[in-house]
Amino acid sequence: MDEPTVTEGARADGPTAGPRTEDHLTIAGRTFRSRLILGTGGFSTLQALASSLAASGAELATVALRRIDTTQRGSVLTVLEEAGVRVLPNTAGCYTARDAVVTARLARDGLDTNWIKLEVIGDERTLLPDPAELLVAAEQLVDEGFVVLPYTSDDPVLARRLEDIGCAAVMPLGSPIGSGMGIRNAYNLGLIREQAGVPVILDAGIGTASDAALAMELGCDGVLCASAIARAEDPVAMARAIAGAVQAGHLARRAGRIPRRLYAQASTQERGLADFS
Amino acid sequence: MIVVNGQPSDVDAGQTVTDVLERLGVEPGARGVAVAVDGEVVPRSQWPRFALAPEARVEVLTAMQGG
C-alpha cells in the first residue's frame, strides 16, 4: 500500500483530524470522502433512514428493486436525493445469474446509473453468495458496461476471479447478512486485501462499531453497513458510532500498528532506574 | 390473461406498457420506475409503443429500501 504524503502544517490533534492527504475512497474513478456506505434496508421508516443517513455521513447508499406500491407515501429515492447521496441499486433477492442480470438492467434503465451492487444468493438461510452464478452474472454485466460491485464470500480465490473479470471492487462478507456476527475470518479478509488491486469493501455482518473498525484495520477500503445501524436500539447513535469507527480504523491502519509479540516489551527504559536497597 | 406484478390484470392484449402504468396509478414520467415484460427489460423510451401479447407477464418495479 502506498504511504500517503503529509503536507506542511497538517494538524495532528483531535480524533478525526489527520494529515491532509488525498485520502478518499475511489471506486471506478469516482471519489467519496466517506468510507462508510449505507444500506437502506431495515429502517422502520423513511424518516429513520433519513436521520441515520445524515448521522452516518455516507455518500453512497444501496437500494433494492421491488414491485411498485403506489399506496406508499414518500420514496427512498427522494430521501437519498435530498441528502445528496448517490444511489447504488442492488440485485437483492436474486438467486440466479439470469435474475440478477435482468434486475441490473432494470436498475440501469429506471435509475439512470450503470453502477450495480451485485448479489446472487446461493442459500436462503445464510444468504451466502452462489459463487458460480455470481461469476456468470458479473462477467455478463461487466461485458454490458456496468460498474459491478459484487457481494462475495471471504474466499480469496473467488475475490481474485471477480477482480480478474473486471469488477470495480470486491465486497467480501464479514459474516452472514444481518447476523451481526462481525468478522468471522479476519485471516481470509487480510488475504483478500493483500492481493486485491481494486477497492475492498467489507459488506455484511457488521454488528457494532468495533467490527467496522476491525475491517478497516485489516485494510479494507470501506465498509457497507445496514442492519447494524437500522436495527440498533438507537440507529442515529449507531450510525455516528460506526462512522467514527470507520474513520478510526482507517487512520489506525495508515498509522502502522505495532506487531503482536508473545512477550512483553517494556516501554520505559531501564537506564536511570533507582536502586532503593 | 395479462399479469401485472403477479396479479391478474384486465389490461387488454395490444395495450401498451404506458397503459399498464396508467392503470397502476404511476405518474407519467415518474422517476425510478423500470418495466420488464416476460423477463426482459422494456426501456422507458419504448413504453408508449410496446404492445402487450395476450399472456404477457409484466413487472413494474421501483427502488425501495434494501441492501
Image: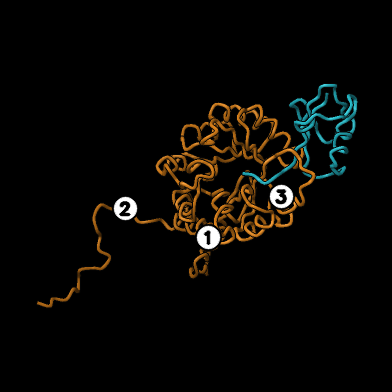
Chain colours: A orange, B cyan
Query: Left or right of A190: which side holds A273?
Result: left
Q: Sequence order check: which comes first, mark 3 or mark 1?
A: 3
Q: Sequence order check: which comes first, mark 2 or mark 3?
A: 3
Q: Sequence order check: which comes first, mark 1 or mark 2?
A: 1
Element carrying mark 2: loop
Element carrying mark 1: helix
Query: Left or right of A80: which side holds A181?
Result: left
- Residue type, numbered disc 1: Ala
Look at the numbered discs 3 and 1 and tell me whether their residues touch, using CB distance below 8 Å.
Answer: no
Judging from the image, mark 3 belongs to the subunit labelled A
For disc 2, the neighbor class at 10 Å (few under 14, some 14 to 19, many from 20) is: few
- Of tags 1 and 2, which is closer to the observer? 1
For disc 1, the neighbor class at 10 Å (few under 14, some 14 to 19, many from 20) is: some
- Of tags 2 and 3, which is closer to the observer? 3
Quadrant of the image occupied by residue A256: bottom left
Spot occupied by residue A74 in the image (x, y as percentages of width and height): 76, 52
- Residue type, numbered disc 3: Val
| Up/down of A17 relative to A120, above or below | below
Residue lying at 52% horizontally and 58% vertically, measured from the top left = A247
Quadrant of the image occupied by residue A57: bottom right
User: Distance between the Cα atoms at labels 1 and 2?
Assistant: 26 Å
Judging from the image, mark 2 belongs to the subunit labelled A
Spot occupied by residue A69 in the image (x, y as percentages of width and height): 76, 42
- Pointer 2 residue: A260
